[in-house]
Image: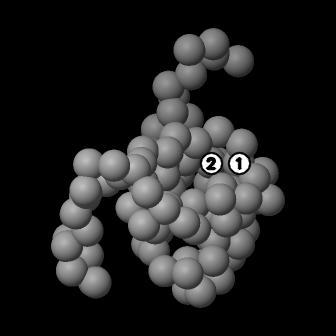
Amino acid sequence: MQPAKRLEMIADSIELQKLLAGLQKAGISRYTVIHNVEGWGVRGIMASTGDVTMLDTAYVIAFCTPEQVQSTVEILRPILKRFGGSCYVSDVMEVKSNPD
């Protein structure tokens, strides 16, 4: 096992491509996107209508090395500040299926 960082982002789907471009700019090319999530945030309830639209909320989860996290956050922060959304960073342990 080795240490890693988990980045979790919640943002409007309309801004999703900007976040993904920011991840790629930071050198993170693997991530998972979950569309049409619901929850309660600073703007109140974010409810689903059942149809996926550009006004829905997306959840993005990505992983990076501890060394990548600072530069990644610096790239994502202006995107989130300008367009809204949240980003959370936590410590995790990666279990590699093919140990080096």
**Which is more N-terminal, label 2 or label 1?**
1
Circle 2 — which element?
strand
Query: Which mark, by number, is residue 28?
Result: 1
User: Which residue is at the front of the view, 4 or 51?
Assistant: 51
- Local packing at callout 2 (Cα closer than 10 Å; few below 14, some 14-19, many 20+) is many
Report which residue position mark 2 lands on. Answer: 64
**Amino acid type, residue under disc 1 in the picture:** Ile
- The image quarter containing residue 70 is bottom right
Can you say whether 46 is above or below 6 in the image?
below
**Amino acid type, residue under disc 2 in the picture:** Cys
In the image, what residue occupies the spot 71% across and 48% down? 28
Q: Is residue 67 visible?
A: no
Q: State if disc 2 and disc 1 touch (CB < 8 Å).
A: yes
**Residue 74 location (% of width, % of height):** 68, 76
**Residue 57 location (% of width, % of height):** 39, 61
Query: Which mark, by number, is residue 66?
Result: none
